[in-house]
Amino acid sequence: MPEGNVIHNQARRLSRAFARHVVTIDSPQGRFADGAALVDHHVLTGCEAHGKHLFIGFDNDLWIHVHLGLFGKWRIGKQPEPEVHGQIRLRIRGNDKYAELRGPTMCEVLTAPEKVIAIAKIGPDPIRRDSDPRRAWVRVERSKAAIGSLLMDQKTFAGVGNIYRAEVLFRHGISPFRPGQEIRWAEFEAMWADLVDLMSQGTKRGRIDTVRAEHMPEVMGRRARKDRHGGEVYVYRRAGQDCYLCGTGIELSDMQGRKLYWCPSCQPA
DNA sequence: AGCTCATGGCGAG
DNA sequence: TCGCCCTGAGCTG
């Protein structure tokens, strides 16, 4: 259940495990058998992440394009690999490592031009140094849609998901319901810079932490014991609990079918 | 054992 | 905007 930081992390791990190796590619489940045959026994040249999209390159100029969706998962480990169990869409085997992909929304083979087109459809990704935030700004600046919705729009902010959306809005005191048109350049610029920092940190750590150092003592003292997603956050999945900073109850509503968390007092309309 | 929910996105209407 | 796809963990009973 990944946001962009996780995909970038996986791209690095896959590159480290397989780049420059001749690899065996197959599909134990069978649903990717045709695609696997196109790149099997080729040299894996490297992996790239663009937002939540992962591209795995081969020396015959073909790419595997993977999107995990909500349920997809990679498992990467050292040989010997465990016995196959469950539905493995794609398996990669090198000299000493293996990787298994389960449950992706998308797993297909693209030619190099098709890969260029796929990337062009994605907006700027805060984790990539080559991203141009002005591409996001022009979409925000002229949109009547809520900023909470724009942050989840992959053509505007590639790689941002439900946690970073909620947390970056909280950190900047911005209501999720404010239209893009009413966001000022300074606010946008600050949020973008913050996403670059938070998501890059998230890539290294493999978890999403958004609580500022000066608030940690307060948060650690009052947070609920059980929260599965793993990092320290201000509002995500904290509906009904008190805001760590002002004590107001964290609100929950539905925005385009996704859960949205915010503090009505720290993020006034 | 069965149900619900999850860091997503697509296509039909 | 809704339903649907995909899988696994964490509940309930």
Image (spheres, coloured by chain):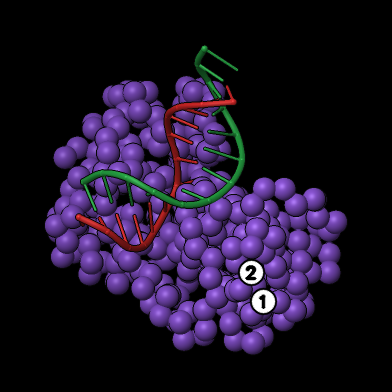
Chain colours: A purple, B red, C green
Residue A233 position in % (x across, y down): 45, 37
In the image, what residue type sits under mark 1? Ala
Task: Check disc 2 and report the residue beneath it.
Answer: A33
The answer to whether residue A178 is left or right of residue A119 is left
Residue A184 position in % (x across, y down): 19, 58
The residue positioned 61% from the left and 54% from the top of the image is A102
Q: In the picture, which quadrant includes the C terminus of chain A?
A: top left
Q: Is residue A263 visible?
A: no
In the image, what residue type sits under mark 2? Ala
Chain bearing mark 1: A
Task: Check disc 1 and report the residue beneath it.
Answer: A37
CA neighbours of label 1 inside 10 A, class few (<14), some (14 to 19), many (20+): few
Tell me if label 2 and label 1 are in contact, CB under 8 Å: yes
Which quarter of the picture shows residue A247?
A: top left
Distance from disc 2 to disc 1, alpha carbons, whole Å, reads: 6 Å
Residue A200 drawn above or below residue A218: below
Secondary structure, mark 1, is helix
Secondary structure, mark 2, is helix
Residue A44 position in % (x across, y down): 69, 77
Q: Is residue A76 visible?
A: yes
The residue positioned 76% from the left and 55% from the top of the image is A77
The answer to whether residue A79 is left or right of residue A250 is right
Chain bearing mark 2: A
Residue A123 position in % (x across, y down): 36, 69
